[in-house]
Amino acid sequence: MEAHLGDQLVIESTATGAARRDGEIVGLHHEDGTPPYDVRWSDTDEVTLVFPGPDAHVRHLGGHRLTDERMSRTESTSPAGGSSGPGDVGRRVADERRRQGISRVEAARRARMSPDYLAYLEENPADPGLGTLVRLADALGTTVTSLLGGGIDRPPGQGRALWHPRFRELSPEECRVLLSTHGVGRVAVSGSDGRPVVVPVNYQVVDEAIVFRTAPHTVAARAAETEVAFEVDHVDEAFSQGWSVLAVGRASVVTDPGAVRRLSQHAHTPPWAGGEREMWVSIRPASLTGRRIDPDDQRP
């Protein structure tokens, strides 16, 4: 069995008097067009993953020739400078869904697909088709490019600014909430030549202190026993909004063996840079400031 996007999958019922079922093939998982397929059923408008049985056949409708609208969306969302393999899309979908606090059932409802298929997509090496990607991007308020990892080599914030942005300062308490428990931030230190240097580090917040792991003689290690600036932010490309938090305080090396052991045992992730990085640095913020850009909902 071989199919193209837009073809019709028809299920012939063997029961007397029973109606057959059909739907549009909106996603392919293999370049040669062999099963399984993502099918949008005509009777429910729901998209599910289908492994056709002997009672199924494909009706070729020339659907692999994308309509002008779908071709336009493909061109405008095609990845540039990035790569995506089987399973990558599912991980990005799951991460974006959790970040927005959307349940799997709700995300599936918005994308007009089965929750079981969304679970399959998030948990298995799947390669959904264009139609599925467009609906998932719409459901999560993002772009197909983002789900495919096409922007991985581009700096954030290349979209258009909001027409009516609202810029506001964040309170220290709001900054603490946004720092949350862990993530990736940037620490600013003085380099060996006296010039400022900014490096990214995996961090976590423990007892209101920002802690990260590094190795002696690295740039990040120069933060120890000095006053440093630490910054973390998030940019929502789809909605051209975001926030940033800046912490300023003195950094010190964690030397107590018990404290080092607890930090190592409860670390959320090893440093992404890899290698032996067992030197813990703690920053006690003397000041916390932040800013946020949102749409101005008060405007007509």
Image (cartoon, rainbow, N blue to C red):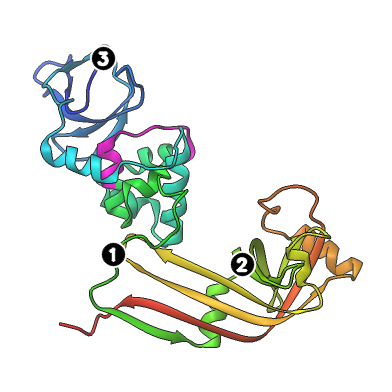
Given residues 1 and 200, the one toward you in this image is 200
- 198, above or below 277, in the image: below
Q: Tell me which corner region of the image, top left, top right, bottom left or bottom right, holds residue 37.
A: top left
Given residues 287 and 6, the one toward you in this image is 287
- Magenta-drawn segment: 123-135
**Whole-percent x, y for residue 260 in the image:** 84, 65
**Whole-percent x, y for residue 41 in the image:** 18, 33
Determine which residue is flagged by label 1: 160
Which residue is at 15% across, 27% downward?
65
In front of the other: label 3 or label 2? 2
**Whole-percent x, y for residue 84 in the image:** 44, 37
Q: Is residue 288 left or right of residue 240?
A: right
Label 1 packing within 10 angstroms: few (<14), some (14-19), many (20+): few
- As measured in the structure, the alpha-carbon distance from the residue carrying label 2 to the one carrying label 1 is 25 Å
Which residue is at 84% across, 69% downward?
259
Point out which mark residue 136 bears: none
Label 3 packing within 10 angstroms: few (<14), some (14-19), many (20+): few
Given residues 161 and 178, the one toward you in this image is 161
Which residue is at 63% across, 74% downward?
230
Given residues 265 and 187, the one toward you in this image is 187
Q: Is residue 30 left or right of residue 47?
A: right
Determine which residue is flagged by label 3: 2
- Residue type, mark 2 in image: Arg
Determine which residue is flagged by label 2: 186
Instruction: Give the quadrant of the N terminus.
Output: top left
